[in-house]
């Protein structure tokens, strides 16, 4: 997708195209009055309006990835403009819903959560299903707020807990678990099982400075996700017997499991460990339900549990081969990241790029007096700073969680650019999380 | 506009080689912006370092649409950071005034962390709540630059600790203070801050809408939190074996603990019982306590380490190169003239000099003497407090 727009942009030796955000902004302004509560002081859409309404519900980026490129071709821009303008009536109705939801929020003295973040998608949904709010429709607003603030996910989680409180259900799932677990075995393994695969990864994680190289990289990725190696590596991670091949990494050191080889997961017995491969089936389903907040339909719990049993038994705890391949690529990236260590060199261009960013972000902490040069500025930060050196653990935990979500919702990972930006995005959020903790350790005593 | 690779990242604008505390930074979606703290306002001095160009969806606001597109095309989807000579983009430049609000926001963050409050130098502290509220409001105003959450995008975190202060400020008889406090409370209401104290603040706000003019006794302590001054005289009863003064390296310690003046660390080598120790005392200003901050003394082969207590004092047992306690006679024989005392983190190759700190104080005094249009209310109040 971005390759096409890049191509369009350099056609004829001069830049052609438009920044996507400026396209959205122009389209927004042509909607006219009635959307003020969704707009900033300058009349453009609020960032949250774009993030919570325009991107997911109007442009529907999941279905239309061409609208998500940073720079879009003129014809794509025209299509985006048309979509946004055509949604004008719904957007005006959504704005009206937001106003009365905010009034109701104030009336009920609700203070939790960011009103825009929570209500924007619901407002658009109401606009589509009900049109503009009817006068004095207190019933709907009260119900909507109750839904949001009671937590729709909680009801689904209650259903799950009731379901697995039934011993027959648990016994049936446990049977399925035993069978599924036995079914997964490494295929043909050789001593250097991972080598050819890792060589291909070097292309996937390497640079591509031309359109041709970018196309080649996509071809290699398509081959990689059809390859049995990630599956075999994942199956090897649990093998009790000595195999000819060995895993190139330790799943304990990577933080993916608390024990080697990986143990068969349980149905519901909670483990002390929060490592991805240690989690029980019920824990995994619960995570899915929590993330399902934005989805249209809540999945059927029995079906979800059955499927999760198979997923928990699959290599790397993921059913589809492309997710397994992304995790293996992520492992290769993760072991090269060390935000505070300038001496670490990287084998992959992508890891080098991420590493350069992490260092810049660490520099921001230094420039803001949250860290001294190269270390903690207060002894209280020691633990968190040490955590920064074990970057692979949080990186892989978060990557695994995102892949698990994609596996459940069957979102493909076949586009190499998307995979690369997933690997980058995980690094970004882990880094932010770490830095917030470093900051918090300093500011602990200030509160009050 | 020229793009060059700096430590593996594409950057543009002048190299900001100045170390903290001279550099002002702001982390926005996909980029880090930096300026030199005492540069006169103006777009030319902005450096943009792209951490992820594809996430910098605000770039057209700063470079114009064609500038954004030209830059994206030049760097491509997958920029090669091995380009040694950089790339020249003809006709692409920062739109006049486009980064000024960002620079002001960055300055606000700088003020929160580096403002050199000092009793000794007569530089009053800044009202933390009012400064944080103003930074929070500017952050919301710059929301287009925070598509991704960054270190600087979190408004809740800025507001959350200040309910108690704002309860007082919304009743202040100074309309500037009242106005800012009310705006901050309104923002907190919108974004759902519900930490301790906030329900009371919202209730007070509802009341005060009815009686906004009610005068109250504002605390006139914008100046400084109470704290003990440091006497420069010697400590203890006995005549010291040696004594001296040292300065705090700002970038080695957290803010809001120590007096930011020079020569605020007093040390002496003394005999207590049979042991030779160094007594160290640093001038504190608060509000945060110095407890646990490391102290190191080094004089040739003799060293001592310890941690400050809540008053900024520490007693360091001194040892020689063989880690043996220093004897009294060895202490008397030793030449202490080159002794160094460092408070805070061990900073390899200190880049922060006394001249650097003096430069910052000059700039800060200039702002206090003649608050410009970009001054924060907290600074204006500090200037008016005539500390």
Image (tube, grey):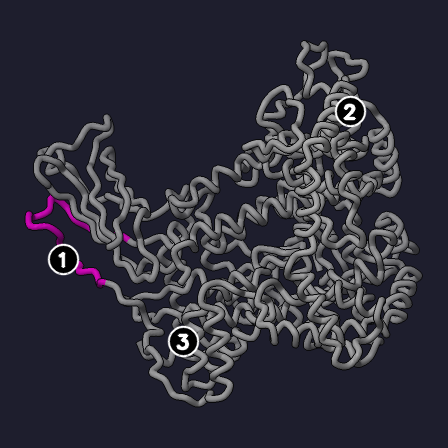
User: Which chain is disc 2 placed on?
Assistant: A
Q: Which residue is mark 3?
A: B368
Q: Is residue A221 above or below residue B71?
A: above
Is residue A363 left or right of A52 when viewed as pictured? left
Q: Residue at x 31, y 65 (%)?
A: B118
From the top left corner, tell me how far across and down residue A119 is, in percent: 70, 65
Look at the image and say whether residue A151 sits in the magenta stretch: no
Q: Which residue is mark 2?
A: A231
Is residue A90 left or right of B360 when viewed as pictured? right
User: Which chain is disc 3 placed on?
Assistant: B
Q: Is residue B24 above or below residue A408?
A: below
Cα distance in 3D space between marks 1 and 3: 31 Å
Cα distance in 3D space between marks 2 and 1: 73 Å
Q: Is residue A52 above or below residue A266?
A: below
From the top left corner, tell me how far across and down residue B328 is, in percent: 10, 35
User: Which chain is disc 1 placed on?
Assistant: B
- The disc, 1 or 3, on the residue closer to the chain's N-terminal end is 1
Is residue A320 left or right of A113 when viewed as pictured? right
Q: Is residue B267 above or below residue A340?
A: below
SS class, disc 1: loop
Magenta span of residues:
B228-246
Q: Which mark is residue B233?
A: 1
Nearer the observer: mark 2 or 1; the answer is: 2
Instruction: Report the magenta stretch's main SS.
Output: loop
Nearer the observer: mark 3 or 2; the answer is: 2
SS class, disc 2: helix
Is residue A202 left or right of A378 when viewed as pictured? right
From the top left corner, tell me how far across and down residue A25 is, in percent: 79, 69
């Amino acid at each position: 997708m971005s390759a096409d727009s890049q191509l369009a942009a350099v056609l004829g030796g001069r830049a052609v195209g438009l920044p996507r955000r400026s396209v959205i902004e122009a389209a927004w302004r042509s909607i006219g009055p009635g959307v003020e509560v969704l707009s900033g002081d300058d009349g453009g859409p609020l960032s949250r309006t774009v993030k919570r309404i325009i991107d997911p519900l109007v442009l529907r980026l999941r279905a239309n990835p061409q609208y998500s490129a940073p720079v879009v071709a003129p014809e794509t821009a025209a299509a985006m403009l048309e979509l946004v303008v055509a949604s004008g009536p719904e957007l005006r109705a959504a704005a009206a819903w937001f106003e009365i939801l905010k009034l109701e929020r104030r009336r009920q003295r609700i203070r939790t959560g960011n009103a825009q973040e929570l209500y924007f998608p619901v407002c658009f949904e109401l606009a589509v299903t009900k049109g503009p709010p009817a006068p004095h429709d207190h019933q709907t607003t009260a119900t909507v707020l109750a839904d949001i603030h009671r937590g729709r996910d909680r009801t689904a989680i209650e259903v799950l807990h009731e379901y697995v409180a039934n011993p027959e259900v648990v016994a049936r799932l446990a049977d399925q678990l035993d069978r599924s677990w036995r079914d997964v075995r490494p295929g043909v393994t050789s001593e250097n099982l991972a080598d050819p695969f890792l060589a291909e990864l070097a292309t996937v994680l390497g640079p591509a400075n031309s359109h041709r190289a970018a196309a080649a990289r996509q071809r290699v990725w398509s081959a990689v996700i059809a390859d049995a190696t990630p599956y075999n590596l994942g199956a090897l991670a649990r093998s009790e017997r000595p195999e000819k091949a060995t895993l190139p990494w330790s799943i304990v050191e990577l933080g993916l499991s608390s024990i080697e080889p990986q143990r068969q997961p349980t149905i519901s017995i909670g483990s002390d460990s929060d490592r991805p491969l240690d989690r029980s089936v019920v824990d995994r389903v619960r995570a899915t339900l929590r993330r399902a907040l934005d989805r249209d339909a809540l999945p059927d719990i029995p079906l979800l549990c059955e499927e999760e049993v198979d997923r928990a038994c699959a290599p790397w705890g993921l059913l589809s081969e492309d997710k397994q391949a992304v995790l293996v690529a992520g492992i290769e990236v993760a072991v090269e990241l060390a935000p505070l260590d300038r001496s670490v060199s990287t084998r992959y261009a992508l890891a080098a790029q991420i590493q350069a960013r992490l260092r810049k972000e660490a520099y921001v902490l230094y420039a803001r007096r949250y860290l001294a040069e190269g270390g903690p500025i207060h002894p209280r930060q020691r633990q968190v700073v040490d955590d920064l050196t074990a970057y692979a653990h949080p990186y892989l935990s978060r990557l695994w969680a995102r892949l698990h979500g994609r596996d459940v919702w069957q979102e493909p990972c076949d586009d190499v650019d998307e995979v690369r930006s997933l690997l980058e995005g995980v690094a970004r959020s882990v880094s932010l999380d770490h830095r917030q903790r470093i900051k918090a350790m300093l500011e602990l005593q200030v509160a009050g | 506009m020229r793009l060059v690779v700096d430590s593996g990242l594409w950057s543009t604008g002048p190299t900001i080689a100045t170390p903290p505390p001279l550099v002002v930074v702001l982390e926005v979606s996909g980029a880090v912006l930096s300026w030199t703290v005492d540069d006169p306002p103006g777009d030319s001095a902005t450096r943009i370092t792209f951490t992820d160009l594809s996430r910098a969806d605000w770039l057209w606001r700063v470079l114009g649409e064609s500038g954004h597109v030209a830059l994206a095309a030049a760097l491509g989807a997958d920029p090669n950071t091995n380009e040694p000579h950089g790339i020249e983009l003809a006709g692409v430049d920062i739109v006049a005034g486009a980064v000024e609000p960002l620079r002001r926001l960055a300055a606000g963050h700088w003020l929160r962390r580096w403002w050199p409050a000092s009793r000794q130098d007569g530089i009053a502290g800044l009202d933390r709540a009012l400064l944080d509220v103003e930074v929070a409001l500017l952050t919301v105003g710059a929301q287009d630059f925070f598509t991704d959450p960054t270190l600087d995008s979190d408004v809740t975190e800025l507001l959350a600790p200040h309910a108690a202060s704002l309860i007082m400020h919304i009743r202040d008889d100074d309309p500037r203070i009242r106005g800012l406090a009310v705006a901050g409370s309104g923002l907190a209401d919108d974004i759902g801050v519900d930490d301790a104290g906030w329900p009371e603040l919202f209730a007070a706000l509802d009341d005060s809408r009815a009686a906004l003019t009610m005068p109250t006794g504002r605390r006139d302590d914008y100046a400084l939190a109470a704290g003990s001054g440091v006497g420069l005289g010697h400590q203890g009863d006995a005549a010291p074996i040696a004594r001296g003064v040292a300065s705090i390296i700002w970038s080695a310690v957290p803010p809001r603990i120590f007096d930011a003046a020079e020569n605020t660390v007093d040390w002496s080598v003394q005999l207590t019982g049979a042991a030779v120790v160094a007594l160290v005392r640093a001038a504190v200003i608060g509000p945060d306590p110095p407890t646990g901050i490391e102290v190191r003394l080094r004089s040739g082969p003799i060293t001592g380490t310890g941690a400050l207590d809540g008053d900024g004092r520490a007693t360091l047992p001194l040892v020689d190169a063989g880690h043996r306690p220093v004897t009294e006679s060895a202490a008397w024989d030793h030449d202490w003239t080159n002794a160094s005392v460092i408070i805070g983190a061990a900073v390899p190759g200190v880049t922060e000099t006394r001249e650097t700190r003096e430069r910052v104080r000059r700039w800060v005094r200039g702002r206090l003497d003649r608050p410009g249009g970009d001054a924060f209310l907290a600074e204006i109040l500090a200037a008016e407090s005539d500390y």
